[in-house]
Image (cartoon, grey):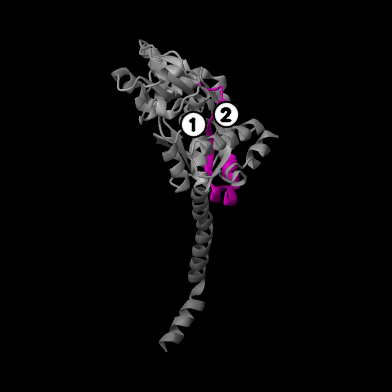
């Protein structure tokens, strides 16, 4: 009896009940798109975690915001060393990273899923000694304490330059110092020279403590320094996202290179460096994005030098390490 009464009330509960039911359905129908729209908006906002080194030639990602497409947001995660940046890419702690080509080669040679899909910067290196020292050439480094960061692009360059001068790393006293600490170590006298990354050399010059021994670009590796990399899974499953990031690198690096004052201001703001030091560093920095045939060849030469120097046990698989597809698409 109760069930019968319930059916009667539900089906034939009068005009008011029917109007109420229809009103509820209408309100629900109108509300659903708003909820759905809100859900879609949140889902469409893609957060890009970008790893960058605390160096002026890794400043480009801080300009991404200026060119960011709708539906994307950028988070810059700074790293002290190239190998830390590479490891963050491999472990997916970041989605993309810009660091030295040497770190990428180290990872690939160890069968880590790191993929270079863009360039980031040429130059940005220098061998610096105390201004009041007798060191004028690389040969003068013999027996001296030289700050070198292991696993860095700078290490590969200095080892090759020493070889070209008939020397080896055993001819100097190599001291492990991070890039950001090199100018202070030189000023304190902890080291006699360092193989640094900008803006370190600029800091030493601006303070009057240091002098340039050389810019080590005379090797077969040219001036290639930093690259743009990601995890293999990203290239395979999110190629459109990788294309967005490389396009950001393209626009941002082009803008920064044509607006050196903006590059100086951004470096001062984000890295806390003194303006006069950064102004000197800008002259030794070439921000870029494209994987040119010359860049690819220089990368392979890098790897060969690292193998000869026994920094890696075998050459990486270049067909998986270097992926030019997206760069080629954007270059058209």
In-image side of 143 versus 162 (left or right): left
* Tag 1 near tag 2, CB within 8 Å: yes
Q: Residue furthest front?
A: 166
Find disc 2 in the rendering and name its residue. Answer: 221
Mark 2 neighbour class, 10 Å CA radius: few under 14, some 14 to 19, many 20 or more = many
Q: Quadrant of residue 210?
A: top left
- Where is residue 296 shown, x and y percent of the image? 62, 35
The range drawn in magenta is 216-244
- Magenta-span inclusion, residue 222: yes
Height in image: 47 above or below 8?
above
- Where is residue 269 shown, x and y percent of the image? 40, 24
- Element under label 2? loop
Q: In the rendered image, is residue 279 in sight?
A: no
Find disc 1 in the rendering and name its residue. Answer: 156
Query: Is residue 74 or residue 221 the one in the foreground?
Result: 221
The residue under the point 58% across, 30% down is 251
- Magenta-span inclusion, residue 302: no
- Where is residue 84 shown, x and y percent of the image? 41, 40
């Amino acid at each position: 009896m109760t069930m019968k009464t319930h059916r009667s009330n539900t089906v034939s509960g009068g005009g008011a009940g029917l109007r109420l039911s229809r009103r509820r359905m209408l309100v629900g129908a109108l509300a659903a798109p708003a909820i759905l729209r809100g859900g879609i908006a949140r889902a469409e906002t893609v957060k890009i975690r970008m790893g960058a080194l605390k160096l002026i030639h890794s400043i480009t990602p801080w300009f991404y915001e200026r060119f960011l497409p709708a539906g994307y947001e950028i988070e810059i995660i700074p790293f002290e060393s190239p190998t830390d940046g590479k490891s963050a890419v491999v472990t997916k702690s970041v989605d993309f990273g810009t660091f030295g080509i040497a770190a990428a080669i180290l990872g690939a040679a160890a069968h880590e899923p790191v993929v270079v899909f863009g360039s980031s910067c040429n130059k940005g290196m220098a061998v610096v000694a105390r201004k009041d020292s007798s060191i004028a050439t690389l040969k003068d480094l013999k027996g001296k304490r030289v700050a070198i960061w292991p696993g860095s692009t700078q290490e590969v360059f200095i080892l090759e330059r020493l070889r070209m001068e008939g020397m080896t790393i055993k001819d100097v006293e190599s001291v492990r110092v991070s890039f950001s600490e090199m100018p202070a170590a030189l000023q304190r006298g902890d080291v006699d020279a360092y193989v640094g990354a900008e803006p370190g050399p600029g800091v030493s010059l601006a303070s009057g403590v240091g002098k340039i021994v050389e810019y080590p670009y005379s090797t077969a590796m040219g001036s290639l320094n930093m690259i743009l990399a990601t995890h293999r899974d990203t290239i395979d499953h999110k190629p459109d996202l990788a294309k967005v990031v490389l396009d950001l690198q393209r626009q941002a690096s082009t803008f920064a290179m044509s607006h050196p004052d903006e590059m100086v201001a951004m470096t001062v703001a984000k890295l806390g460096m003194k303006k006069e030091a950064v102004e000197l560093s800008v002259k030794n920095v070439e921000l870029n994005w494209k994987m040119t045939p010359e860049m690819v060849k220089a990368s392979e030469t890098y790897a060969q030098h690292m193998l000869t120097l026994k920094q890696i046990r075998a050459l990486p698989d270049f067909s998986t390490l270097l992926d030019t597809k997206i760069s080629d698409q954007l270059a058209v």
